[in-house]
Amino acid sequence: MITGVRSRLLGVTATASAVVVLAACGGSGAASSRNTAAGGASTAPSASPTPTEMTTGQYVATVGAIDKPVSTALSAFAASGSTARLDAAATALENAAGLLDGVAAPAAAAQDNVDLSAKLKALAGDLQSLAKGQDGNGNAVCAAASPAVQAGRTDSLTALATLLKTMAAAGHPAGITLPKFPAQQQRSLATGTYLRDTDRSGNGQLTIENGGDGDAVITLTRSGTRSFAVYLRKNGSYTVKGVRDGTYTVYFTTGSDWDSGRKGFTSGCAYQKFDETLKFTTKYTSTQVEYTTYTLSLYAIPGGTASTSNVPPGQFPTP
């Protein structure tokens, strides 16, 4: 019996001790302790309500409204190919993905909803890379390449198109209509076409042989000024006549699909220069004129001595 009483007394003592501590914090009497206890009960965390799962009809309507700006932005970008439209499309894709993450999709569409958000983000990332002059793998794209053409060739766009078909077949379409992006072209000029021809009043001759994998444009500069630039198709050969005396640096760019407006190749491009300069001279005698001739091969040949170096696109002289 004593043990039992002691146990009860200890319990009372502990309670009384708690009351004293609470009163010391600014309350008085038992009423203060009761109010504090009540306040503690009201601040206990409560579970957030679980979002109500949408019906299929509600989901389709909701996602259609979320994705409508994506269709609009992608269509505008595909039509113009401008950097501004590219940025707007990337933003629209990111915004839609963020909103989809908060949608309580029905069970039948839950995984597709997750996949749709992920693929919108992936395409947005690829567009952002294109804005920086890179493809989805971080490789540099040609300076003259159209962003819209590059976007149409991305794996992320193909993956999104596949998912949209899957969702439509499953009865919960995403509401995105993908535009037709412009296709990669294969434009070319005739061998011997001059893109610049302002300094050919001399006697020198330069024969150029293009045995590389693509078309080429050769640009010669003298004293930092562009003298002339000529186009050669793959496997083409051409002789430039009338080269004036002087020392020239030879630049050449190779690739496919020459965009005359952007003055560059849009696919498979490379920018290089010959490390050695070419010096043209003319000597007159009483009976003849002696002048310099060169032959340049834009591919490795046995016994060739000319070395080349890559040139950053921003430092390459525009033809």
Image: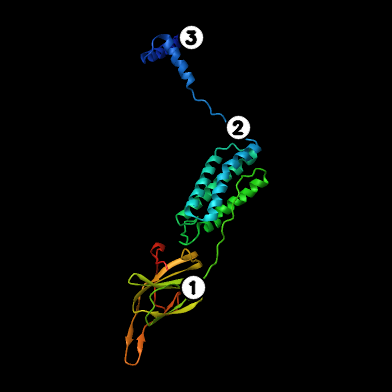
Residue flagged by tag 3: what amino acid is it?
Answer: Gly
Q: If you read the primary sequence from the N terminus, does the residue marked by circle 3 or circle 1 appear first?
A: 3
Q: Give the residue pinned by disc 1.
A: 212
| Image coords of residue 95 (percent x, y) | 51, 43
| Image coords of residue 154 (percent x, y) | 54, 56
User: Is 239 placed above or below 170 here?
Assistant: below
User: Is 81 placed above or below 17 here?
Assistant: below
- Residue sitting at 62 percent across and 51 percent down? 162
Q: Are marks 3 and 1 in contact (CB under 8 Å)?
A: no
Residue flagged by tag 1: what amino acid is it?
Answer: Gly
Dot 1 crowding, Cα within 10 Å, few <14, some 14–19, many 20+: some
Left or right? Give the position of 173 relative to 209.
Answer: right
- How many tags in the picture? 3
Q: Are marks 3 and 2 in contact (CB under 8 Å)?
A: no
Q: Are marks 2 and 1 in contact (CB under 8 Å)?
A: no
Residue flagged by tag 2: what amino acid is it?
Answer: Thr
CA separation in Å, label 3 and label 2? 53 Å
Q: Give the residue pinned by disc 3.
A: 4
* Residue placed most toward the observer, 115 or 295: 295
- Residue sitting at 43 percent across and 9 percent down? 30
Can residue 252 be seen by looking at this rendering? Answer: yes
Residue at the bottom extreme? 287
CA separation in Å, label 2 and label 1? 64 Å
Q: Which is in the foreground here, disc 3 or disc 1?
A: 1
Q: If you read the primary sequence from the N terminus, does the residue marked by circle 2 or circle 1 appear first?
A: 2
Q: Which is in the foreground here, disc 3 or disc 2?
A: 2
* Residue placed most toward the observer, 234 or 284: 284
CA separation in Å, label 3 and label 1? 102 Å
Q: If you read the primary sequence from the N terminus, does the residue marked by circle 3 or circle 2 appear first?
A: 3
Q: Give the residue pinned by disc 2.
A: 52
